[in-house]
Amino acid sequence: MKKNWWQEVVVYQIYPRSFKDSNGDGIGDIRGMIEELDYLEKLGVGAIWLSPVYQSPNDDNGYDISDYEAIMDEFGTMEDMDEFLREANKRNIKIIMDLVVNHTSDEHQWFVEAKKGKDNPYRDYYVWADPAEDGGVPNDLRSTFSGSAWEFDEESGQYYLHLFSKKQPDLNWENDDMRQAVYEMMNFWIEKGIGGFRLDVIDLVGKKPLEEITGNGPRLHEFLQEMNQATFGNHDLLTVGETWGATPEIAKLYSNPERKELSMVFQFEHIGLDQQPGKEKWDLQPVDIAQLKEILTKWQTELGNEGWNSLFWNNHDLPRMVSRWGNDQDYRVESAKMLAILLHMMKGTPYIYQGEEIGMTNTPIRDISEAEDIETINMYNERLEKGYSKEEIIHSINAKGRDNARRPMAWNGEKQGGFTSGTPWIALNENYKEINVEAALNDTNSIFYTYQNLIQLRKDNPIMVWGSFELVDTVDQVFSYYRKYEGECWLIVTNFSNEEQPFISEDEIEEVIIQNDKEKITTLREITLRPWQAFVVKVK
Ligand code: NOJ
């Protein structure tokens, strides 16, 4: 496989609304991001995945786009965006734009036109269907944000499809003109010098809604190959698809370089492990570490040279991993560092979600009035109606709700954590006085420096990027593996639990590469790992 820059970098995700506010309106913005580029350079990342900054009525915080070639007023102007690109490029940081083309906002000009009537040239840009024989919805498709995926349009007597909110009508990828318009828009951004795209729910674009096929539809890969040719194919860009249903076999279809589709995909198999099988993400069960190891090992070994992994614990849709599978009470620092080491030592491109590098935690709410996220609020109302108790629902929200990751970044211990001089659009986590960037930078032992160290190690050691992966047989709660490359061998050992765990190996330590506590590791013979202990050693 040819070596690409996007295999070597570490990517940092910014959720602009919550990153840094520069003008006191309580909403993060582009000038705030420019102010903090030096911080990201210090961390060492080579690319930023930017959640949407386009014009949007914000029904789903920017994932409902009303103009792809304009910037959201609250975030700034196109001049600010151009400056952000220039300033990032100066620091060798590429900008990966979020490409949301499964749907638009209902306020996008295309949909405004489409609603005008069946004869409108834009009508077919969206998915319309006649009512069922009984006059009701065309079929049982459900929206990810609760309720039917079909919304009635009084004027034409037809329904339109929205796999997300009513204000996010699905685009009809069967329409050639629509696809060409999307490619033109992508080229507009490519010409600005961006570093690539993250493709929102891209597995849905081949849908056949009347046959109730949503993910992995028949023409999906044909569309992606067409897109590749029409847009990023001849540019050296990073493209990563969000693909919830991907198996390693499916991931190879997207990311085998010979097929000319995408660089890599986000797979979510491990992310579903703490949800009851066949149910929704809100139906909780504890994660089984043996299963986690099995799934991640499968992904590490099965792609081979026919694909590339993306590695992540967090994003703006997921709860904070240190609270979820780590321990944000007694072992916050240890478990956050352990999670970082475990992930960054695997094969693939690592992604860091803003605040992860300082160990930011989930923010429990007591009442639904404290929630902002449309998915959370709709689910709350739906489950209340179905008879669930308030307590049960709030418990699920605190474990899985998307607001957990969307609380403002804490920059210092001052008022509103230095995020804004005004009133933030959503309250900060109360722990911002202890958990903030300034405190992390002032403490040489902080989680931040573990991340910084891991990123530097990746730059200095090709084994971290290219080495093979081999799971080591251990007790369930210990996750250990080798990376091997050109005669060199690294052993990664992590304790994924609150208890001490045994570990035994015949290997001789040649050098300690990184560890998450101070006590230097000297032997591997028969050791007892402390809770959440993690280390990497070069072995003979
Ligand atoms: C996935 C995005 O990550 C999420 O935030 C959004 O709500 C849906 N796609 C719809 O765009």
Image (cartoon, helix red, strand yellow):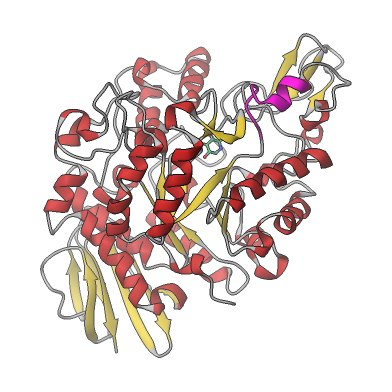
Q: Residue at x 67, y 43 (%)?
A: 185
Q: Residue at x 78, y 54 (%)?
A: 222
In this rendering, the answer to whether 188 lies above or below 520 is above
Asked if residue 462 lies in the magenta stretch, the reply is: no
Image coords of residue 281 (percent x, y): 49, 36
Image coords of residue 25 (percent x, y): 33, 23
Magenta stretch?
103-113
Image coords of residue 208 (percent x, y): 79, 38
Q: State left or right for residue 168 relative to residue 75.
A: right
Q: Quadrant of the C terminus?
A: bottom left
Q: Residue at x 24, y 61 (%)?
A: 450
Asked if residue 107 lies in the magenta stretch, the reply is: yes
In this rendering, the answer to whether 280 lies above or below 296 is above
Q: Residue at x 19, y 41 (%)?
A: 435
Front residue of 118/245: it is 118
Front residue of 494/222: it is 222
Location of residue 229 (image quadrant):
bottom right
Q: State left or right for residue 183 relative to residue 515.
A: right
Q: Quadrant of ligand 1?
A: top right
Q: Is residue 154 visible?
A: yes
Location of residue 200 (image quadrant):
top right
Q: Is residue 317 visible?
A: no
Q: State left or right for residue 351 relative to residue 478.
A: right
